[in-house]
Image (cartoon, grey):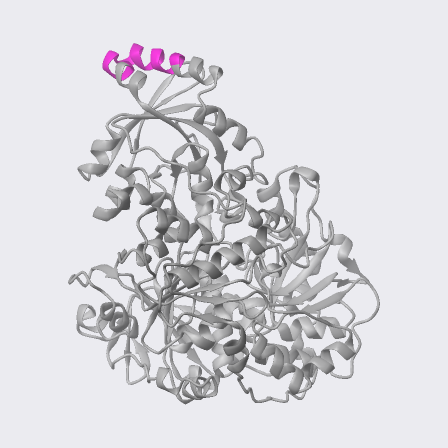
Amino acid sequence: MKLWEKGAYLVNGKLTDAGSNPADGAKKTMAYSILQKHNTSGDAAKLKIKFDKITSHDITYVGIIQTARASGLEKFPLPYVLTNCHNSLCAVGGTINEDDHMFGLTCAQKYGGIYVPPHQAVIHQFAREMLAECGAMILGSDSHTRYGALGTMAIGEGGGELAKQLLNKTYDVAYPGVVAIYLTGAPVPGVGPQDVALAIIKAVFDNGYVKNKVMEFVGPGVASLSADFRIGVDVMTTETTCLSSIWRTDAKVEEWYAIHGRPQAYKELNPEDGAYYDGAIEIDLSEIRPMIAMPFHPSCAYTIDEVNANLLDVLAETEKRAKVSFGDKVNFSLKNKVIDGKLYVDQGVIAGCAGGGFENICAAADILKGKDTGNGKFLLNVYPASMPVYQELMKNGAFSSLVSAGAIIKTAFCGPCFGAGDTPANGAFSIRHSTRNFPNREGSKIQNGQLSSVALMDARSIAATAANKGFLTAATEYDTEFSGKKYFFDKAIYDKRVYDSKGIAHPEVEIQFGPNIKDWPEQKALGDDLLVKVVSEIHDPVTTTDELIPSGETSSFRSNPLGLAEFTLSRKDPAYVGRAKAVRDMDASIAAEIKTVVDALAKKDAELGKKAAAAQTGSTIFAVKPGDGSAREQAASCQRVLGASANIANEYATKRYRSNLINWGMLPFLYKDGDKNLPFANDDYVFIPGVKKMIAEKLPSITAYAVKKDGTVNQFELSVGDLTDDERKIILAGCLINFYRE
């Protein structure tokens, strides 16, 4: 795999650094054509995107619709699909989950949407099967909203961005860089899409090579991949922190649309000759070997052969990563999983938008045909991504092979990906063809001394490991004859169960609310000056959204802002909630602290003290690089509900987390001098005079003052980076809801 150090042209189907005009060549990419087709600004550099369709699942759509309702929603102005694939089990919190589903159904009826009942399909599989179109754009409130392999540019964002689309507003973003992913060769038997994806993520995550850019898949190697294979690679591009993805299309994609009864959705997409890219990655698919992403990130990837050959060294590296995430809170080790020099795995899962596709499961069935997973601890669970896929796997015998080998077949559900299904035992090690393996994601509760760990692998090697009774095994070690079964899609399954309004609203329908569904609390507009207390300080290289607001069992409270906020940072900094609430509620101790802070500032400058005494108060956290992972807006809104006014960071891991902060009226401050020798620490106060003027007048930076416990005042600079005019207005108004009310 080769990463180009500079830009590249695509000429006569080959990459070259020889070209005459990057500006003209940049207009010849597929990404440019699709983005400008959906751009309403009239300015090619500053995009205001109107999407063709939007989609959400059942731990995001309640908050989105509540935001839009509070802002004046009367009808869904574009197709909006509400799927139910996260809180599907209706088993946590009594009737809470099903209450959310009934809210979704009645909103689809009232406002003119589409409702997909639980267990019918995971959000992205339904979107592929029923929504994707070549040249279209889809926005989803899930970070893995990626349909580029089917010619659709898709973006995953927080709920506020979907609420904007529901209110006939736009998705505003500077025109992104575009990077060519140039594929050659063809995968060897036993290598699957997750192997290719993990190899790419390993190459680009740490260096930010594609961060907030569009990945454009080109080259002769694309033709060697089936549509299902491309989909499996594409969905994992989210883990590179790119903005979106797009692939050239061909006869295989045309056949895919025909199989799904939508031949009109296909058109050929290719970059024009001479297209210019801001960077390029060359990948020879024939060189990819079965991969495993060890805990605790998809970028912690190795070949399985490498792990087996250097097992203790790899496990030592994993333990070092655990130390960064968990410190001394738990004693993490996987060395007890080594038996006779081999790595033993407790559990295997093939599931969701990444693993639950037809070809992945058929390949796993081919490997396991006539074999036995054993009756020890190891267990293999398989979740097809939709009921049409499920039905075809029943018909073609794949399920029979899997069940006969000892696997358990379940329905379409995203739970194994985010910690609400197949939660491993304490100390267990699970291998999964799913999307993420972050710390604190799969049911771990560090404060209780519980920790399980997940590695990511392709379905093929998971099946090979299952056939080897749980000992880590690459699929290439088996001489499998892959059947290449053909897929037949039955749309009647959806016709009988999915509610489709056809875009017709029924305003007479009453929305069904459950007792757990609460309105967003009121938020104040930004004051002239701001005094914040630092209530958490995180020095991990990257902080994920799972650490900011845990997934798993908290999902049932996503419709209850106050209830969910109680879990904020609970697995990373359990003291955070109490500290933040004390500031929000202005406890007596906080009032006394603020008086001391005001006095310290007054000693430095009487006018500073006067302003601080009258300033708006709030809290903030510091993190080196927060926001990797999920698009969930609650990672920001929960802080806001607890009284937060800002984040301070060296950089933000993703655009979507920064956008979530902005949409909830929080200042996305940047401190450029690293995390060593910070001018403030946890429990210190930071005073930012003139913050309202800074936002309103587009000042590049602002002078802030950190007040230490001993009364020392440190002066330093903060900035907020680029903000659109509307983003500035949202921050000034206090949140997106306030902005649209006004």
Side of 521 where 77 appears, left or right: left
Q: Who is closer to the viewer here, 56 or 610? A: 56
Side of 52 where 450 appears, left or right: right
- Asked whether residue 117 is drawn in magenta, I would say no
Residue found at x 62% / y 46%: 322
- Quarter of the image with the C terminus is top left
Residue found at x 59% / y 88%: 484
Residue found at x 53% / y 84%: 489
- Asked whether residue 608 is drawn in magenta, I would say yes
Q: Position of residue 497 (x, y in %)?
A: 54, 73
- Residue furthest out toward the right: 375
Q: Which residues are magenta?
A: 595-609
Q: Position of residue 136 (x, y in %)?
A: 32, 73
Residue 22 image-quadrant placement: bottom left
Q: Who is closer to the viewer here, 357 or 562? A: 562
Q: Who is closer to the viewer here, 405 or 415? A: 415
